[in-house]
Amino acid sequence: MSVEEIFAGQKLLALMGAELARVAPGEVDIALRFRDDLAQQNGALHAGTVAAIADTACGLAALSLMPEGSGVVSVEFKINLLLPAFGENFLAKARVVRAGKTLSVCTADVIADGEKVVATMLATMMRRPPSRAS
Amino acid sequence: MSVEEIFAGQKLLALMGAELARVAPGEVDIALRFRDDLAQQNGALHAGTVAAIADTACGLAALSLMPEGSGVVSVEFKINLLLPAFGENFLAKARVVRAGKTLSVCTADVIADGEKVVATMLATMMRRPPSRAS
Amino acid sequence: MSVEEIFAGQKLLALMGAELARVAPGEVDIALRFRDDLAQQNGALHAGTVAAIADTACGLAALSLMPEGSGVVSVEFKINLLLPAFGENFLAKARVVRAGKTLSVCTADVIADGEKVVATMLATMMRRPPSRAS
Amino acid sequence: MSVEEIFAGQKLLALMGAELARVAPGEVDIALRFRDDLAQQNGALHAGTVAAIADTACGLAALSLMPEGSGVVSVEFKINLLLPAFGENFLAKARVVRAGKTLSVCTADVIADGEKVVATMLATMMRRPPSRAS
């Protein structure tokens, strides 16, 4: 399946209103508009929202470099919340740091309103061979 | 604010239908029923959903040991997705490993249907003094 | 190779004077006596020393559950330094949280003088099949 | 104390033969020559060695932006070992991603022989005010 098809299956991201903003080899951006129901008590995006878009961008960036028909699962990720995620428009920008045969390592920054990096992620993604990817 | 009041302000968790299941000193459980719109392409819970309940449980567990009136923010967390998060009922069980004056370190397991640990988190939480917590 | 043989090849741990203290299925303890040349500026063990024994204990714990002849490499780890690592005798106690066919997830605590947990690690280890393990 | 003075107190790094290669505001490089006693069973640098130089570079990069007289401690770090750390000359290159009043977030790459990134770290460092830093 293509990056676009896999993205379309991420129902959590549809619930959040996130959109696939850019796909290039080894790089994927996901855009999200602020919504009050994605926030925490102080009106910033919840860390879970921030993690969801960054993790998905990392997984799709990894997938973009894998052989046709592969699937991808998140092995693990770590995220630092650098600033409270206040803003109107958020962009999770992921890129592959190292693409291995089985594992890929990716980073993502989440940027608020085009200027402030509010979070940064370092993630490990695993390839699923075609037969197990459906 | 109490753990219950802070939980009530987590709008993302309300969107997900998560509930505060247990609060004890240094321990918080959050329950979540599976819903299709919280899933990813293969019908398991999305990693972002799993991270959201685990991170919130960690933050509230940390808060439960802080002085009255404190707030809490997530500094960072790391989560390992051990198994695909298939199941009907999920429980994020967090406990404080080390409660410091400023920083608290917490772990959480996310358990599917009372038996399978599908994810484990290690997180750092920061206390906000009363004047900055509102 | 056995856990003992792999441990014997960890030259960094020999340099540090670390010893294999216990091996059980899925659990490995490594012991280290404080030495001034393993410390940082304030007389506590350096975080790199703490990480070295915890990472090795995690890798060997994972190896202990793998098929005969396997090798193991660290994919990634995260460590929280909970307290300054002051003490005379340190023990890194690792256990496997989830043993998969390719990846294993482990945790380790580093304990000072039998009582204080000074650090906790969450790590991902990867199996090397026999032909690639030598 | 200056970055150079704090580095001089890192006895583990002296034991390893590491050197402070570059200090700029928010950026620190630490150099290490391969030595057999810093390796693991397959002749690559041990993950503990790699983590030690990357963690120290991160801490000193954070310190370089803190008020005069501050100290620094590692709160936590996560490291991905991207490739086996084979090589003659290693450089841990750290930079500050976000410098806060109390916490700083840093990344570091460890580069072998000037070309291969063998590991990448994402770390949280904490400032110690002058009175507690000695």
Image (cartoon, coloured by chain):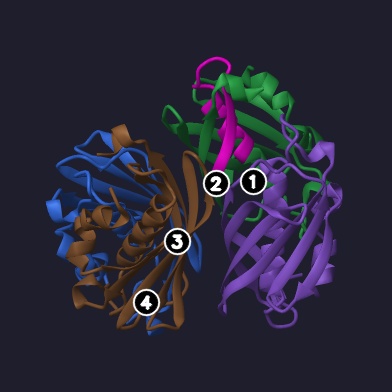
Chain colours: A brown, B blue, C green, D purple
* A83 horizontally vs D122: left or right: left
Q: CA distance from mark 1 to mark 4?
A: 32 Å
The Cα atoms of the two marked residues, 3 and 1, are separated by: 20 Å
Residue ID for mark 4: A85
Residue placed under numbered mark 1 in the picture: C51
For disc 2, the chain is C
CB under 8 Å between callouts 2 and 1? Answer: yes
Q: Residue at x 59, y 34 (%)?
A: C73
Q: Is residue A21 left or right of residue D99?
A: left
Give the x, y percent position of residue D7.
Answer: 81, 64
Chain assignment, label 4 = A
Labels 3, 1: front one: 3
| Image vertical order of residue A131 relative to residue C109, above or below | above
Given the image, what chain letter belongs to the residue carrying mark 3? A
**Residue, disc 3:** A79
Do tags 4 and 2 sit on the same chain?
no
- The alpha-carbon separation of the residues under discs 2 and 3 comes to 13 Å
**D81 magenta-colored:** no
| Residue A12 occupies quadrant | bottom left
Q: Are marks 1 and 4 in contact (CB under 8 Å)?
A: no
Range of magenta residues: C55-76
User: Can see residue A64?
Assistant: yes
Check disc 2 and report the residue beneath it. Answer: C77
* Nearer the camera: disc 1 or disc 4: 4
Q: Secondary structure at mark 3?
A: strand
Q: Position of residue A94 (x, y in %)?
A: 44, 63
Nearest to the observer: residue D117 or residue C106: D117
Instruction: Read off the chain for label 1.
Output: C
Q: CA distance from mark 3 to mark 4?
A: 13 Å
Q: Residues within 10 Å of mark 2 (few under 14, many from 20)?
A: many
Neighbour tally class for label 3: few under 14, some 14-19, many 20 plus, Cα within 10 Å: many
